[in-house]
Image: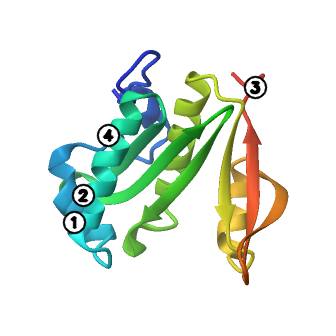
Amino acid sequence: MVLGYNGPVHATDSNHFAPVGITVRPIGAADLRPLHAALFSTQPFAQFQAHYRQFGRWQTCRRACWLVAVAGVHGLVGSGQLRCYPRRAEIANLIVAAAWRGQGIGAALVQSLVAAAQQLDWEAVEVLVAPTNGRAQTFYRRLGFTLTQTLQLTPGAPALLLRKPLRGLS
């Protein structure tokens, strides 16, 4: 089960998005150290662990979803999070190991997170992208996201807000 509350999205529902040999599933406690080592090693482990615990609390309250991509014996190769706010959800911390990029893993994670948000009846999914990150902009546009606005998060740090409406989609 991806989301541990009413209206769960089951991992098997998400896997039809994944490339052959890749499984998209909810993060588990046993994934914490391997995921940190593989994809988040620049962050202190205690901080990463605290983030995991916070996501667990948010999931209980229908406010979050954290998925990982597993490549058989190769282990964890990707991760993506969904944070839910009133009427919309935000994709955050989407990452795929460098050696596994370009194989559809990021798309599978995003599509699975969008499916979770849709099942929970959110109006839209949003993502923030740096204006200089053309590759990410192209990636999200290919998945149905459109530019909504440019935000100034902090002085000198603009971000593009891309949005995918979910209402009316099946």
Mark number displayed over residue 46: 1
Marks 1,2: beta carbons within 8 A:
yes
Alpha-carbon span between mark 1 and mark 3: 38 Å
| Image coords of residue 140 (percent x, y) | 68, 56
Q: Residue at x 48, y 60 (%)?
A: 93
Q: Residue at x 66, y 72 (%)?
A: 135
Q: Report helix, strand or loop for mark 3.
A: loop
Pointer 4 local density, CA inside 10 Å: few below 14, some 14–19, many at least 20:
many
> In the rendered image of this protein, does residue 86 appear above or below residue 29?
above
Alpha-carbon span between mark 4 and mark 3: 27 Å
Mark number displayed over residue 56: 4
Q: Is residue 69 left or right of residue 81?
A: left
Image quadrant in which you'd find residue 75: bottom left
User: Of callouts 4 and 3, which one flags the residue occurring earlier in the amino acid sequence?
Assistant: 4
Marks 2,3: beta carbons within 8 A:
no
| Image coords of residue 113 (percent x, y) | 52, 40
Mark number displayed over residue 167: 3
Image quadrant in which you'd find residue 132: bottom right
Mark number displayed over residue 49: 2
> Closer to the camera, 101 or 96?
96
Residue type beneath disc 4: Gly
